[in-house]
């Protein structure tokens, strides 16, 4: 490979890395929502995989069945995080054209892909 081709390849890789870093920042602003128990528990997660909010309806709170509420919260949290990861993974695939780029897999792993 010529030096010119190698230089062009390095510049393209750097541009892609910059776009991916920008996408990471944008992902923090995007959210995914999930609910469980017919909407009794609703959770929102952002594209960075952080929980943003949890809403629990009064009717879901039963002091005699705390385990049910725990299960509902856990299910909604897991689903919201999964949806956020899929959202970011889809964006990353668009950015890379679906290619598996050596060295970029760590970046994808941050977002669950």
Image (cartoon, grey):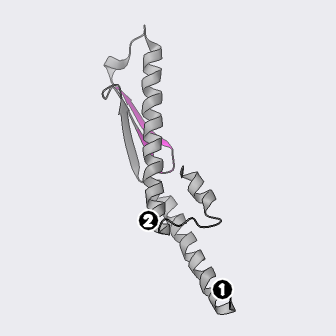
User: Which residue is located at x 44 percent, y 60 percent?
Assistant: 91
Task: Answer left or right for 54 relative to 5.
Answer: left
Query: What's the magenta region?
Result: 44-56
53 within the magenta span: yes
Q: Is residue 83 above or below residue 21?
A: above
From the viewer's perspective, is residue 85 above or below residue 40?
Answer: below
Residue 35 drawn above or below residue 10: above
User: What label sits on residue 6 in the rendered view?
Assistant: 1
What residue sits 31% from the left and 18% below the top?
59
User: Where residue 45 sits: x, y (%)?
Assistant: 44, 43
The local crowd at label 2, few if under 14, some if 14 to 19, many if 20 or more residues have their Cα within 10 Å, is few
Where on the picture, by quarter, is residue 7? bottom right
Q: Earlier in the sequence, mark 1 or mark 2?
A: 1
Q: Which residue is mark 2?
A: 94
Using the image as rendered, state which of residue 49 and residue 96 is in the foreground.
Answer: 96
Residue 67 got which mark?
none
Badge 1 element: helix
């Amino acid at each position: 490979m010529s030096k010119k081709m190698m230089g062009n390849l390095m510049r393209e890789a750097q541009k892609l890395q910059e776009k991916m870093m920008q996408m990471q920042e944008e992902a923090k602003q995007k959210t995914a929502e999930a609910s469980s128990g017919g909407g009794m528990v609703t959770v929102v997660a952002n594209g960075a995989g952080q929980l943003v909010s949890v809403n629990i309806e009064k009717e879901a709170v039963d002091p005699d069945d705390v385990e049910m509420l725990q299960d509902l919260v856990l299910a909604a949290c897991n689903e919201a995080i999964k949806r956020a990861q899929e959202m970011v993974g889809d964006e990353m695939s668009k950015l890379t054209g679906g290619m598996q780029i050596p060295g970029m897999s760590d970046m994808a792993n941050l977002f669950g892909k």
